Image (spheres, helix red, strand yellow):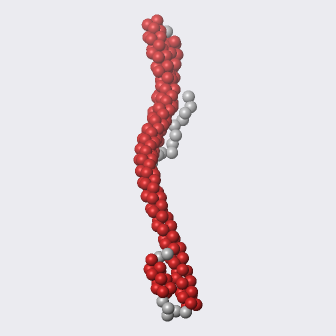
Amino acid sequence: MNQHLQSILTLIQNNDGFTPEQKEALIKSIKATDKELEITAFKLDRTEKVKRTTAILLEETIEELEQKRKAIEETNATLQQSLQELKAAQAQLIQSEKMASLGELTAGIAHEIQNPLNFVNNFSEVSTELVDEMNGELEKGNLADVKQIAQDLRQNLTKINHHGKRAGEIVKSMLQHSNSSSGQKEQKTKPSMRL
């Protein structure tokens, strides 16, 4: 029993100023109060233990959260680095695709220009042979053959002129397309692609 309540209890028991019924009621009240004090002390003790346990758990939780925060920061840094690497790789891939497209475009342009140039070269070679042949016929005095060779030569020169203009039109068309791609106005005429 609480020592203060014990003192009060002893005082009541030794005091003759109370009737036995009053003493019994007071003693009963003191014992009930003592019991309530014991229960309250127990609850306070238990609350203190819970408080200490909660504080320990809270410290552990804070420590865990701090570790997780550091891990998230490290992951974030790694992701940022990966993102930068991906952006660099993407830029490099775009550049590679542009170069591949440029290569395809260049090959197509070369092919388009090569066709009329082949005709120009072939007709030029044939014309050179015709000039040699014509000189030979002139030395022999075969004017009829010379006139025929001159007509063939004229036809070849017409074809050389035609295919030279065709190559020029292709180049002009590409230049117009290039100008329109860079924001300049494109003319609507297209060169003939016939052979």
11 up-or-down from 72: above or below: below
Residue drawn 47% across and 58% down?
Answer: 57
Residue 22 image offset from top left, x and y in percent: 55, 91
> Which residue is at the far right?
21
Q: Is residue 165 visible?
A: no
**Which sits in the foreground, 32 or 104?**
32
Quadrant showing the C terminus: top right
Residue 147 image offset from top left, x and y in percent: 50, 16
29 up-or-down from 142: above or below: below
Residue 78 image offset from top left, x and y in percent: 43, 45
Q: Is residue 88 visible?
A: yes
> Which residue is at the far top?
140
Residue drawn 52% across and 16% down?
Answer: 148
188 up-or-down from 25: above or below: above
Residue 157 image offset from top left, x and y in percent: 47, 23
- The number of numbered badges drawn on the structure is 0
Answer with the quarter of the image where residue 19 lies: bottom right
**Which sits in the foreground, 177 or 39?**
39
Residue drawn 48% across and 68% down?
Answer: 45
**On the rendered structure, is 19 left or right of 99?**
right
Residue drawn 47% across and 76% down?
Answer: 2
